[in-house]
Amino acid sequence: MNVMQRILIALLFLFLWFPFACKRDKGLTVFNSFPERAWSRFEKQSFDFRIADNSFPYDLMLILRHSENYPFGNLYVNVVTEMPGGEERSMEHDFKMKDSDGAFLSRVKEEGYREITFPLHTGLHFAEEGSCSVEIENLIPKIEIPGVLELGVILQRSSPE
């Protein structure tokens, strides 16, 4: 095999390998559905993840899928994250759902619902591997939030800066 053939084989290998090497880690995504299309005030939502590699930071994000019937300009929640090893982190979030004109900030999806993503934790470091649980509590002071279809949590590797 001459030098030119080796170069062509190496280029072919790189050409075939490159698209797979550059794919971003989609992470883990878990959704909870609301069959009644409403989230009750005292119905906490739980999400569980397995941390198999703690050598890099993670981002934890919330996804809300809702209908046009969502009545509020915000989503007010408390998020409790139980880290592997038992440490708990709790934080309240008041996420903006609508702009000053009352238009939704979420995107319309082909399936007919709207979707918006909010950051919960960025650059989250886990001291050890193991189980991680996230509990999200609805803090809007009404009996329920109509128009909520699904609530999801994504855990993925943080993007390098």
Image (cartoon, rainbow, N blue to C red):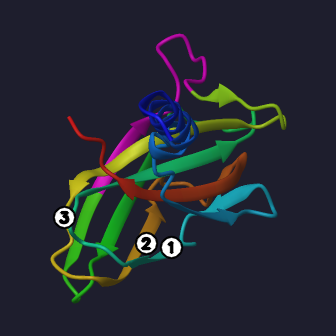
Lower sequence index among marks 1 and 3:
1
Callout 1: SS: strand
The range drawn in magenta is: 92-105
| Residue 77 in picture, x, y percent from top left | 41, 55
Depth order, front residue of 86/18: 18
Q: Which residue is drawn at 51% across and 41% down?
A: 1
Tell me the tag on residue 125.
3
The furthest residue to the front: 2
Q: Which amino acid does label 3 sit on?
A: His
Q: Which residue is drawn at 81% across and 62% down?
A: 36
| Mark-to-mark CA distance, 1 and 3 | 18 Å
Q: What residue type is labelled 2?
A: Glu
Q: What residue type is labelled 1?
A: Phe
| Residue 31 in picture, x, y percent from top left | 63, 63
The furthest residue to the left: 127
- Look at the image and tell me in which quarter the C terminus lies: top left
Q: Name the residue under label 1.
A: 47
Answer with left or right where residue 40 lies relative to residue 129. right
Q: Name the residue under label 2.
A: 135
